Image (cartoon, coloured by chain):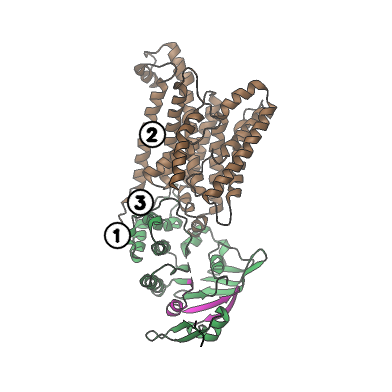
């Protein structure tokens, strides 16, 4: 007879895992706030973060902490949450552990959207996240339609669809950059690889708003996703409103990817590495994977960004380069495992 | 209960099912037999609403199936098919527990209750899968997976079972166990079952009624004795058979004749 301990304590286990991951996130956040091209003192920083005013921090250090570091870390965390949660959702929906927003070209779709807004609607800042969302959604639908075949979305078809969409959209990006002037092109190229330095409060609001809405929608549909992972027919037979869940999850994931790309460009591999590690450690139940990936994703990008800021300090690497350096080898390993 | 009225299903130009009527009665097992491509599985898919008929309708309790919410249908009708996609690791227990989805209350996360777990465990025991409960589904043999799929269907507490070749891949002992399980559910719980199968003799033993299909049409429908005749089987399968009575049960026993003379 099966021990029911697995399901019975599933909720407790989920909460415990999320709590532990959150603690790790907080530690990473704190350490990252002190590390950088200018190191901040530990005691002073911790004191200032608790809100006290008479701390061992100079005015300049305070400004670095609160005006530069903290907003940047918050954005990094939001980006990580968005991409990891979206990655977990795409993997469940497309029934493929290798589905990832960057690899499938969805990030590129959002980038095209953002760039279109930037170039043709420069004055209207709100168009950027909106167009990014639209771009991500269009790319998602394109990949989904391309990958469907009589045998369903096999891994090969999905990767192929991703390659087609990615390369097509890359050309679109090149096209748009030719419309831009030279000075913007350079900063754009940097942004495209993941740039967390352009933080502003409106950006953060958009990012966190998207995180809240997107992740909530995904969690609400997590159980349906569990069944859809086993096949859309099975899920339908068992009572899942397949079309509706698919639509909501695609929209939520596109929202997350769009917000992330609109704020900080294309950061790749987060949606691959984090959900995979979470599944490896805790199983495939999306009710745990999605919240856990959301929290762990924030930690991952915060750490990656800290490395990006410090490895060749005072110059910066794009955070996307760090995540790719970590993620690509893991991707190869996953491919080989089959 | 569940009824298909003059249902036709077309795939583009091709007519897969042509004007078939069938009623799944409480306490009865109906088997559907026929050659490959006769439309048996397609008909089954229409019966649970996954395929929409191009003509005719499917009624549940005299109301159109389409008027019910998905969840409600899933609580009443369970499907045992062979399509589980197992690219992600899932244990047998988690898999069977998935059958409780339609019963989850409206809580956001939908965590299973003690009762859900108990029902899943009972279903696992009934299908003799107890020793496999913590194993991963993709580590099992085809037959073991089939039993897990049946366990999941049992866990849905549905009263109507639609089974698509449930005994394929099962050894003789488990074939018997599976059909006996379905039979006893129908006898004791007044469930209804519609079974698409290639095993003519098992159908003869366990069904109340048999439908012979060919090219999407019903060729014959009635008790096994009336339907499983040498003429009708030759007409449907293009194969010469001998039909006599099973020495113990008396049910029709179909023996194909392969050799000439």
Magenta-colored span = B194-223
In this rendered view, identify the residue nearer to me: A193 or A84.
Answer: A193
Q: In which quarter of the image is residue B189?
A: bottom left
Q: Where is residue A302 in the image (x, y as percent from the top left)?
A: 44, 29
The answer to whether tags 3 and 2 share a subunit is yes
Q: Residue A22 carries which label?
A: 2
Find numbered disc 2 in the image and state the secondary structure of the residue it sits on.
helix
Vertical placement of residue A244 versus B234, above or below: above
Q: Residue at x 51, y 30 (%)?
A: A320
- Is residue A325 in sight in this rendering? yes
Determine the chain carrying the residue at label 3.
A
Disc 3 vs disc 2: Cβ atoms closer than 8 Å? no
Determine the chain carrying the residue at label 2.
A
Q: Distance between the residues labelled 3 and 2?
A: 23 Å
Find disc 3 in the rendering and name its residue: A7
User: In terms of sequence position, does the residue under pointer 3 or pointer 2 come before the other?
Assistant: 3
Question: Is B207 colored magenta in this rendering?
Answer: yes
Vertical placement of residue B128 versus A136, above or below: below
Determine the chain carrying the residue at label 1.
A
Disc 1 vs disc 3: Cβ atoms closer than 8 Å? no
Find numbered disc 3 in the image and state the secondary structure of the residue it sits on.
helix
Tell me, by letter, which chain the rendering colours brown: A
Q: Which residue is drawn at 58% across and 57% down?
A: A150
User: In terms of sequence position, does the residue under pointer 1 or pointer 3 come before the other?
Assistant: 1
Q: Of the residues tagged 1 and 3, which is closer to the observer?
A: 1
Tell me, by letter, which chain the rendering colours green: B
User: In terms of sequence position, does the residue under pointer 2 or pointer 1 come before the other?
Assistant: 1
- Is residue A134 in sight in this rendering? no
Disc 2 vs disc 1: Cβ atoms closer than 8 Å? no
Q: Residue A1 carries which label?
A: 1
Q: Residue B78 carries which label?
A: none
């Amino acid at each position: 007879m099966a021990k029911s301990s697995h399901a019975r304590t599933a909720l407790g286990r989920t909460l415990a895992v999320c709590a532990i991951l959150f603690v790790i996130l907080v530690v990473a956040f704190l350490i990252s706030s002190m590390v950088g091209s200018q190191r901040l003192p530990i005691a002073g920083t911790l004191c200032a973060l608790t809100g006290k005013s008479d701390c061992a921090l100079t005015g300049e250090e305070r400004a670095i902490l609160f005006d530069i570091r903290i907003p940047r870390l918050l954005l990094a965390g939001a980006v990580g949450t968005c991409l990891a949660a979206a990655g977990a959702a795409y993997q469940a929906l497309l029934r493929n552990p290798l589905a990832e927003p960057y690899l499938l070209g969805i990030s590129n779709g959002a980038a095209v959207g953002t760039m279109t807004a930037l170039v043709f609607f420069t004055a209207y800042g709100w168009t950027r996240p909106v167009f990014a969302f639209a771009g991500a959604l269009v790319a998602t639908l394109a990949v989904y339609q391309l990958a469907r075949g009589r045998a369903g979305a096999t891994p090969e078809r999905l990767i192929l669809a991703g390659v087609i969409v990615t390369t097509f959209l890359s050309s679109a990006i090149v096209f748009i950059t030719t419309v831009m002037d030279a000075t913007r092109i350079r900063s754009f190229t940097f942004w495209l690889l993941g740039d967390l330095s352009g933080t502003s409060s409106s950006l953060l609001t958009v990012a966190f708003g998207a995180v809240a809405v997107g992740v909530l929608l995904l969690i609400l549909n997590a159980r349906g996703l569990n069944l859809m992972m086993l096949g859309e027919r099975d899920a339908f037979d068992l009572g899942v409103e397949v079309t509706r869940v698919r639509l909501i999850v695609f929209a939520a994931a596109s929202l997350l990817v769009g917000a992330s790309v609109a704020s900080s460009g294309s950061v790749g591999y987060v949606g691959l590495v984090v959900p995979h590690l979470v599944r490896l450690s805790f199983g495939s139940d999306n009710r745990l994977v999605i919240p856990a990936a959301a929290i762990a994703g924030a930690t991952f990008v915060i750490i990656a960004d800290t490395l990006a800021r410090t490895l060749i300090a005072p110059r910066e690497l794009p955070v996307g380069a760090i995540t790719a350096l970590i993620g690509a080898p893991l991707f190869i390993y996953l491919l080989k495992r089959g | 209960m569940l009824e298909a009225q003059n249902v036709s299903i077309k795939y583009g130009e091709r007519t897969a099912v042509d004007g078939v009527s069938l009623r799944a009665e409480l306490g009865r097992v109906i088997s559907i037999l026929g050659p490959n491509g006769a439309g048996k599985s397609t008909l089954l898919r229409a019966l649970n609403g996954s395929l929409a008929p191009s003509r005719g309708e499917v009624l549940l309790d005299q109301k159109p199936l389409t008027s019910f919410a998905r969840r409600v249908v899933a609580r009443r009708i369970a499907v045992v098919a062979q399509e589980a996609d197992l690219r992600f690791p899932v244990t047998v227990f988690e898999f069977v527990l998935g059958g409780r989805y339609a019963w989850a209350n409206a809580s956001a996360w939908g965590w299973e209750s003690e009762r859900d777990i108990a029902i899943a465990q009972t279903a696992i025991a009934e299908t003799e899968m107890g020793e496999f409960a913590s194993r991963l589904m993709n580590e099992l043999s085809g037959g073991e997976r089939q039993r897990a799929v049946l366990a999941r269907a049992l866990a849905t507490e549905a009263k109507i079972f639609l089974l698509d070749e449930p005994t394929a891949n099962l050894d003789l002992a488990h074939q018997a166990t599976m059909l006996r399980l379905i039979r006893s559910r129908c006898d004791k719980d007044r469930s209804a079952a519609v079974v698409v199968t290639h095993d003519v003799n098992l159908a003869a033993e366990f069904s109340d009624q048999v439908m012979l299909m060919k090219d999407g049409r019903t060729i014959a429908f009635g008790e096994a004795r009336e339907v499983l005749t040498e003429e009708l089987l030759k007409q449907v399968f293009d194969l010469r058979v001998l039909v006599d009575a099973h020495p113990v049960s008396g049910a029709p026993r179909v023996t194909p004749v392969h050799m000439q003379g």
